[in-house]
Amino acid sequence: MLIAGPTSSGKSALALKIAEKTGGAIINADSMQVYRDLRIITARPSPADEAQAPHLLYGHVDAAENYSVGRWCEDAAAAIRDVTARGLRPILVGGTGLYFKALTQGLSAVPPTPPEIRNAIRARIEAEGPEALHAELARRDPAGAARVRTGDSMRIGRALEVLEATGRSLSDWHRDGMPAALDPANAVKVFLHVDRGELYRRIDVRFDAMLAAGALEEVRALAARNLDPLLPAMKAHGVPWLIRHLKGEITLAQAAEEAKRDTRRYTKRQETWFRNQMPGWTAIEPGEDLRDLLD
């Protein structure tokens, strides 16, 4: 079973309820809940929740790692095999749409590059000219540079973006590919929809609760590691704003409000993404009877 939905929609609680009723194990499909440094600020299931049903792929990655969609697909496929072998029902739950898409439709050979890297490369092309960056590409990926004109800014930029983001050339990525690890026809697929006003209220309440539970101290410990700010874990909702507060740049109240605002904007993108990218999923409301779907 696959359970998706926006942040704060109640996905984890629903997954736990179904796991208890059907003999299931919960597999994480949230790109931030994989990081062990971020239990509180990402609202990972509590130890009490984890004691009620098996939970896999939560907090198994160090924040210093740039954990990719491809790696998650490999880990998720292994987790599904493990859970099934134990006679349990795999329940994948999370809000990262690309995880679900890659799992059920396969993964494009070339992963998306972070916008920070893309923008930096574009700025360099404007400042230094495409010829200078083509020369750099020739040093780092001679075969790739030979296929690109020296004045082709777009293709030069794309090739350098991929090298910078992944450490591998476009040619390497084109040779690889990842088929779907799960046939969507064999899975129950639901998207949890919550009224926007109610969802925003939940976001605000949850962030306040995370602060009360020690989110600021958690982020303080993360910041003390002096990790690359472009790493995914350093961009988890709330982390950049709380770090700014810890640096004395803004008040805690300002950090909290900005974090809540960012999260609200993110939920809009989540809903749009699933609506456009994941046809065939069943939209459900909180509290809806799922017995027909689970039979």
Image (cartoon, rainbow, N blue to C red):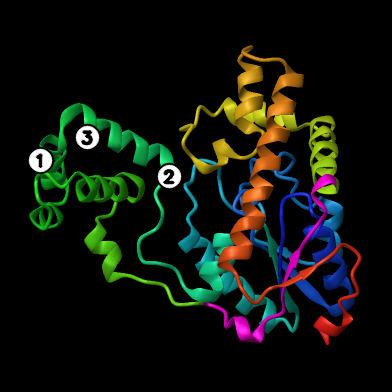
Question: From mark 1 to mark 2, how far is it between C-alphas?
Answer: 23 Å
Number of other residues with Cα within 10 Å of mark 2, as a class: few under 14, some 14 to 19, many 20 or more: some
Numbered circle sitting on residue 87: none
Q: In this view, does 154 lie to the left or right of 63?
A: left
Q: Is residue 164 left or right of residue 241?
A: left
Q: Does the magenta stretch include residue 185?
A: yes
When the figure is inspected, residue 278 is found, relative to residue 43, above or below; the finding is below
Question: From mark 3 to mark 1, how far is it between C-alphas?
Answer: 12 Å
Q: Which residue is at a point 72% across and 20% down the rendered structure image?
A: 254
Q: What residue type is labelled 1?
A: Ala
From the viewer's perspective, is the residue at label 2 or at label 3 nearer?
A: 3
From the viewer's perspective, is the residue at label 3 or at label 1 nearer?
A: 3
Numbered circle sitting on residue 114: 2
Helix, strand or loop at label 1? It is helix
Q: Please state which of residues 73 and 75 is positioned toward the viewer in this rendering.
A: 73
State the image coordinates of residue 55 (x, y, percent, origin top left): 73, 63
* Res. 96 in view: no
Numbered circle sitting on residue 135: 1
Number of other residues with Cα within 10 Å of mark 3, as a class: few under 14, some 14 to 19, many 20 or more: some
Numbered circle sitting on residue 125: 3
Residue segment shown in magenta: 181-197
Q: What residue type is labelled 2?
A: Pro
Residue closest to the far top: 248
Q: Please state which of residues 281 and 179 is positioned toward the viewer in this rendering.
A: 281
Q: Return the disc, 2 or 3, that comes first in the chain's sequence.
A: 2
Q: Do the residues labelled 3 and 1 touch (CB within 8 Å)?
A: no
Q: Which residue is at a point 52% across and 43% down the rendered structure image?
A: 232
State the image coordinates of residue 130 (x, y, percent, origin top left): 15, 38
State the image coordinates of residue 217 (x, y, percent, origin top left): 72, 27
